[in-house]
Image (cartoon, helix red, strand yellow):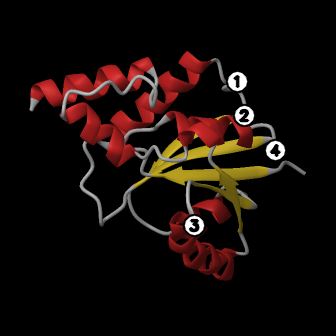
């Protein structure tokens, strides 16, 4: 039996923290679906397609084995349904703080109730626990150096987007 997981997120943009979780997940599962999801409570800087492309570029840049990865977007609908349709038994959720778990726990319970999919919580790497996509965008917008938090590909795309605004 193939062990499949879904790693969902808005990834606006994907940080080194996100990518660290992804790399670790590929060691636990035969196949990992990286799923860019729409979050109606957020106004993204990048389109879903741009975010997906940045993740692909970042994975290559970091030398992560791409063979177990599948890349997709979910513009509407339930994550639990996506997992069920694609035969996934687990959702991967990274967390930085207890606040992240408090936010994610009810959703994990509902996803399990809807489809039986389990949520695996993975702690961020120690040096990246304070980094969020929002913080990266804010630092970049104020002219700060974000190279410690994102790949070169993401840094370049953020600068292009900010310069176009």
Residue beneath disc 2: 68
**At x 62% / y 36%, what residue is drawn?**
20
Q: In the image, which is nearer the foreground, mark 2 or mark 3?
A: 3
Q: Where is residue 30? Give x, y as percent.
A: 80, 41
Residue beneath disc 4: 28
Q: In the image, which is nearer the foreground, mark 1 or mark 2?
A: 1
- Disc 4 is placed on an element classified as loop
Q: In the image, which is nearer the foreground, mark 1 or mark 3?
A: 3
Residue beneath disc 3: 98
Q: In the image, which is nearer the foreground, mark 4 or mark 2?
A: 4
Q: Is residue 77 above or below residue 53?
A: below
Give the crowd class for mark 3: few <14, some 14-19, many >=20 residues within 10 Å: few
Q: What's the distance in space between the residues labelled 2 and 3, CA to CA?
A: 30 Å
Query: Is there a contact, CB below 8 Å, between mark 1 and mark 2?
Result: yes
Image side of residue 32 versus residue 136, left or right: right
Task: Indicate which disc, 1 or 3, sits on the residue closer to the N terminus.
Answer: 1
Q: Where is residue 15? Give x, y as percent.
A: 47, 36
Q: What's the distance in space between the residues labelled 1 and 2, CA to CA?
A: 7 Å
Q: What's the distance in space between the residues labelled 4 and 3, CA to CA?
A: 23 Å
Q: What's the distance in space between the residues labelled 4 and 2, CA to CA?
A: 11 Å
Task: Indicate which disc, 4 or 3, sits on the residue closer to the N terminus.
Answer: 4
Dot label at residue 65: 1
- Disc 1 is placed on an element classified as loop
Q: Quadrant of the C terminus?
A: top left
């Amino acid at each position: 039996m193939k062990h499949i997981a879904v790693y969902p997120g808005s990834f606006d943009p994907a940080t080194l923290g996100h990518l660290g979780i992804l790399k670790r997940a590929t060691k636990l599962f035969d196949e990992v679906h990286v799923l860019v999801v729409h979050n109606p409570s957020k106004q993204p800087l990048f389109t879903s397609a741009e975010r997906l492309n940045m993740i692909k570029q970042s994975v290559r840049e970091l030398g992560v084995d791409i063979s177990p990865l599948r890349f997709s977007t979910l513009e509407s609908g339930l994550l639990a349904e996506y997992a069920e349709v694609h035969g996934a038994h687990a959702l991967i959720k990274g967390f930085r703080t207890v606040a992240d778990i408090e936010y994610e726990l009810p959703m994990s319970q509902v996803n399990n109730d809807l489809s039986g999919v389990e949520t695996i919580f993975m702690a961020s790497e120690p040096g990246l626990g304070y980094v969020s996509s929002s913080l990266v965008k804010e630092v970049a917008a104020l002219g700060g150096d974000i190279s410690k938090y994102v790949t070169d590909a993401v840094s370049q795309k953020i600068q292009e987007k900010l310069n176009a605004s």
